Structures are given as structure tokens and as C-alpha cells.
Amino acid sequence: MRIIPREVAKRKPITWSREIRNLQKRLKLTPLQKEVLIGTLLGDGCLVENVYGKNYRLKIEHAAKERKYVWWKLKVFEEWTLSLPKFQKKTNSWRFRTISHPVFTRFHQLFYRNGKKILPKKIDKFLRSPVTLAVWFMDDGALGPNRQGVTLNTQNFTREEDERLRKYLTKIFHLETSLHKDKRSWRIYIFPRSVPQFTRLVEKIILPEFKYKLSFR
């Protein structure tokens, strides 16, 4: 799923018109897009409302050094976008947004409450694919303490939500985990003994730029 920027640049510009409305009507998330979306929402991605406050769109933004990752996600959601990623000088990052769509509004209802990201009650229905796990790791994963194990930075979730995530990481992916305190929050730690299993799940999916996160001792 590599992307060459000029491939995207060849697309004809689209303006808001009947063509856009027709585009919104015919678009449906593919299984891959859904898997990447879930991993992104567990990680750094967010859903923002459109100017009319009617529907939501997916916003992807990563640090400048992760530019290729932004283009990779653009390739995944290519038909959902109208423009190329733009560099944000203020935050030294690259960003793009999809069109607004009812499907993103439905996911906003699942992943947000009172403007704050939450963990859906039935997250086990979505947390099924190694693709989702790999995207979540690329977004918010890191080597564990002393370069052993894997850390998933889940500080934005509550401890109860983190415990549910731990439960399904064990049940679905057979990964042994614990919670590590990070100031007033918690994050998930995958034990070194589960690293071989974790690596088997994600190593063929993650981009070369993130292989350093698998450089265990």
C-alpha cells in the first residue's frame, strides 16, 4: 500500500456540486478502510464536524517526520478526499481531511461523548484485524522501558477502558499485557514474552519508517 504522491496529484480537482453529493451517496467503507479507521481512532486520528454541523469527517495529522505515513493513509482513503495533504507550519505536521459523511458521523457517535474520545462498549467487534493493531501501533506505539516489550499510549482513555482493551488484546490476539502508570493516566504494556506474537501480527503491515519501534533488545 505504498503511495507515490504524483499518482494522487493526477486527480482532477472537484468542487462542491451535485457531483460531490453523488460521491457522498455512493461511497462505502471497504473492509480495509474500516480496519485502518478503527486503528486510527484508537490512535491519533479524530473525527471533526463539518461547517454545517450535520456530519463528521476524518482528520489525519502526523508529525513532519511521518509524512510518508500520512501519504499511506491518503492512499487508503483516496476516494474520500478532495485535496492532497498540506504542511502545517505551526505544528510542523502534515494533515488531510476526508469529505464529511454519515458513516463518519456514526463512528463519532461510537467513539465520542461530550466532545471527548471514548472506547466503544463493543470495541471487540471492531478490534479484530492485525491491520487495526498495526495502525494503532504506528499511531501510538513505542518500545517499552529498556527497549523491552511494547507500549501503547492509551492515556486518553480511562483505566476501565484500558482494562477492556487489555482483555481483548489477550482474547483476540493472545497478547499478555499490564497497565503502567503515566502521571495521572495509564498506558498498556505488552510483555516481552508476547513480543514474538505481536511482531508476527504486525511486521508485514507496518511501514519501514516504524520498524525502529520493533528494535527490541
Image (cartoon, helix red, strand yellow):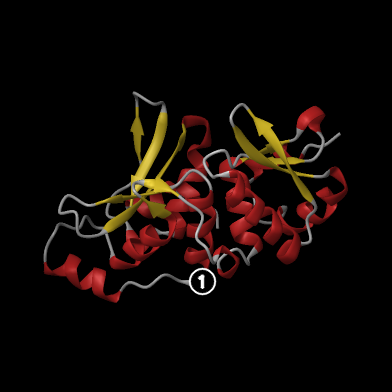
Q: Is residue 201 visible?
A: yes
Residue 42 point in image, percent of width and height: 53, 51
Residue 67 point in image, percent of width and height: 48, 38
Which of the image's four quarters has the C terminus? top right
Report whether 64 appears left or right of 213: left
Report whether 12 appears left or right of 193: left
Residue 22 point in image, percent of width and height: 20, 73
From the image, tell me which residue sits under label 1.
31
The residue under the point 21% across, 55% down is 13
When asked about the image quadrant of residue 201, the answer is bottom right
Q: Is residue 99 visible?
A: no
The residue under the point 32% across, 72% down is 27
In the picture as drawn, the residue positioned furthest to the left comes out as 17
Amino acid at dot 1 = Pro
108 to 189, vertically: above or below: below
Callout 1: SS = helix
- Front residue of this view, candidates 185 and 172: 185
